Structures are given as C-alpha cells and as structure tokens.
Amino acid sequence: MKIIIDEVKETQEEYILFHIREMDLKVSNAIHYLENMDTFLVGKADEKLYKVKFKDLYYIETVDKKTFLYTNENVLESSEKLYQLEKKLQFADFVRVSKSMILNIDMIELVYPTISGRFEAKLLNQEVVAISRSYVPGLKKKLGLGRD
Amino acid sequence: MRSFIKNRCIMFCIIFSVLVLIHFFRGGELSNDVVYSFIFVSFFSSVMSFVLKDNEKFRARRVMIYQLIYLCIIMVTIVGISCLLGWKQSFSTVGINFIIVMGIYLLIKYLLFTEDKKEAEGINTALKERKNNMK
C-alpha cells in the first residue's frame, strides 16, 4: 500500500484520509490503533481508574495541589501534575488559560471580556471559567490568530 | 514584561493628553509647574496600575476593592503635589479633581473593554470557523 504524507501548518487540523477499495483487517486495525493512540488520560474516582478520552474532557484544573479532570458527568483525579498534562496535550486541542487550568478548545462556546478586566469562557455545558489575560495570546495562537 | 511596559506607556500618554486637554478647556495656563505635575501624575498613575494587575485567585469583589484603592492613591498624589507646589486646595477643587480622575479612569476602562471585546470577537469567529471546518 502506498503511503503519502503531507505536512500541514501548525494551525491546521491534522487528519488522515484513506483511499481504499474495501475495508480489510489491516485498515481497520490501523484505524483502531490511530483512534486509541494516546488520546486519553487516566483519572481516578471512587478508588477506580477510568480512561477519559481527550474529546470528552472539558478542562483540567489544579485545586490544592491536586489535579482534576472534568468531563460533562464526572470529576476524576489525576496523578499527574498540570505541567505534565500540558506537555502531553500540547499537540491536542487544549490550551492553558490560567495558572491552574488547561481548557479543551472544542468545549468553548464563546469568550467574552468582563468589566473587571478579565476574560471568561462559556463552555458547552454552560459552565463559565476564567481566562487569565496573560494566557489570551496562547489561546489566539492555538486558534491561528495573533503573532505570539 | 514588554507588553507591561507598552501598556504603561500607552496609559501614560492617555492620562497626560486628557489632563492637558481638560486644563486647556478650563482655560488654564500651561506653566512649567503644571506640566511637571501632569507628567508626574501620569507617570505615577501608569506605574501604580500594577495594583490593578489581574491575580487569578482574586474574586471580582477584591478586584473592585483594589481599583478603589488605586483611585485613592491617585487622589492622595494629586492633593500631595498640589500642596507641594503651594496650590490652594478647597473642597470644590478636590471634588473637581476627583471627577477628572474618575472620568479618566472610566475612559481608560471603556477603551480597554472595547479593545477586549474586539479581541473576544476575533476569538469567537475563529472558534466558529473551527467548528464549521470540523463538521
């Protein structure tokens, strides 16, 4: 099977396109591998460990030196530090929005400024989280806007 | 650090320009003392604005209290400079100065908020485009 690799810009979304005659075991294995390849984090709740897919995560927050993974239904504790998770998620659709939070960009419904001079993000589950001014350039960069 | 200095410089320019304009429209003369006092107040106000620097852990109420403290510091500076330069200070003068300080403060707040709104709109547009591309 011929393999063609095209490099895309950092701001563009990465995708894989298969041109196949029919779905066979080799291709379905490849798809299965790609779908499950490092796209989840492990969190603990009620002394049980759970896999949380990146796409199900709303945000990750540090509270009292403990790191928590927030999904729509659950809050799971992670054994990793925020900076370690930030490194792990650097190529995924996550961005640091404050000293204590990493946010899934796909979960942002809209961003707005407040009178007190802050930015806030309304998430798809209607929760509101604060975005620190100093991390706004990072968010813009991730979205392909701004210089730095 | 660069953006901090840049923002302080912008703030200095806005405050100084507004002070000169107000003084001009009130028919005052721009003597050396007046210019120096305007420069000092503008510089001090822009430098002291670190008080307003966002701390993620602060609640909105605490931020508002810091903003009030900042305004008080500016008012005390103005009264202090006026006393040093031997300018007469009546209640009405202090009241007018307070109104001017509040006016400049609200103007800067408005300008910053407008700028933030534009920035947020840009982000929201990019988020929308991103969602459309993913469909």
Image (cartoon, coloured by chain):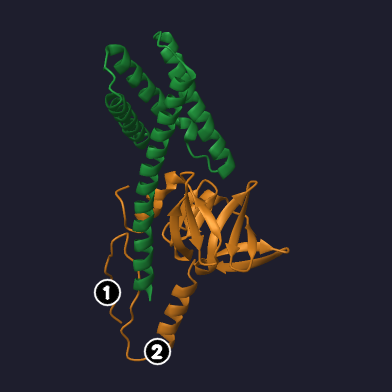
Chain colours: A orange, B green
Residue at position x 31%, y 30% from top? B18
Above or below, A95 relative to A55: above
Measuring from the top left, give residue B36's x and y in whole percent.
32, 16
Give the secondary structure at mark 1.
loop
Looking at the picture, how far across and down is residue B46, in whole percent?
39, 28
Answer with left or right where residue A39 lies relative to residue B17: right
Front residue of B41 and B59:
B41
**Viewer-closest of A20 and B40:** B40
Q: Residue A126: give its label.
A: none
- The residue that mark 1 highlights is A4
Relative image position of residue B87 (x, y in whole percent): 40, 11
The numbered mark, 1 or 2, whose residue comes first in the sequence reads 1
Farthest right residue in view: A46
In the picture, the quarter occupied by the N terminus of chain A is bottom left
Q: CA distance from mark 1 to mark 2?
A: 19 Å
Give the residue at mark 2: A23
The residue positioned 41% from the left and 49% from the top of the image is A136
How many numbered marks, from 0 up?
2
- Residue in front for this viewpoint, A39 or A95: A95
